[in-house]
Image (tube, grey):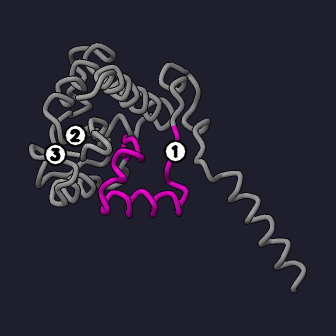
Amino acid sequence: MRGGSSLTNSMEARFAVQLYEKLTKQFGIYVSASKVSVITPYAQQAALLRRTFSQALGYDYHHSIEVNTVDSFQGREANIVIFSCVRAAGSKGIGFLSDVRRMNVALTRAKHFLFVIARCDSICVNPYWDQLVNDARNNEAVISVPRSFVDSEGPLTQLKTKYSEAHLKRRKQDTQCKTITI
């Protein structure tokens, strides 16, 4: 583990809590009625996530949120899954995340919504993750999360994909071109 990783892991765990709270606040009954599962390939990250959820939401957090490792969650589903893979070590390799079977289990557990919390630069050293991240970028599904968001009270809608403005310009140009050619 390189220096500063535990602080970053802690921040990523707080982001998972903030994401859950913001989802609950914005989508209320749907999120409250669904048990949310937070999964990670790493036992230590799962323990950190449990502590962070317990501190933020109280001891009874487990009634609405399940935190587990990918291996423990195999064969099960949840309506909403938050997949935390923040311990990836970048150029040093990505450990458990490089196992395609674990990746498959992690990415196929959500019935309705899947959120992946990751450092894209770190996981893209693996060709499978690189392909997934590139596909997500092409579909404008990668959201850069500023550190300030973790402690903010702002709505989820304040998060925007990197490509939103460029996409809007392209869309506007496409519309103008179509208007000209018609």
Check residue 182 in the rendering and tell me which mark sits there, or answer none: none
Check residue 70 in the rendering and tell me which mark sits there, or answer none: 3
Q: Position of residue 66 (x, y in %)?
A: 20, 34
Local crowd at mark 2 within 10 Å, few (<14), some, or many (≥20)? many
Query: Could you say whether the residue bearing mark 1 is in a helix, strand or loop?
Result: loop
Q: Position of residue 146 (x, y in %)?
A: 54, 31
Identity, as a three-letter code, of the amino acid under mark 3: Val
Left or right placement of residue 75 versus residue 33 in this view: left
Tell me whether the residue at label 3 lies in contact with that at label 2, contact meaning CB atoms closer than 8 angstroms.
yes
- Asked which quadrant contains residue 30, the reply is top left
Q: Position of residue 116 (x, y in %)?
A: 36, 45
Local crowd at mark 3 within 10 Å, few (<14), some, or many (≥20)? many
Q: Residue at coordinates 20% horizontally, 26% vertically from top-left?
A: 62
Return the residue nearer the eye: 10 or 61.
10
3D distance between C-alphas at marks 1 and 2: 19 Å
Mark 3 or mark 2: whose residue is earlier in sequence: 2
- Would you name the residue on which mark 1 appears? 143
- Would you name the residue on which mark 2 appears? 40
3D distance between C-alphas at marks 3 and 2: 6 Å
User: Magenta region: which residues?
Assistant: 115-144
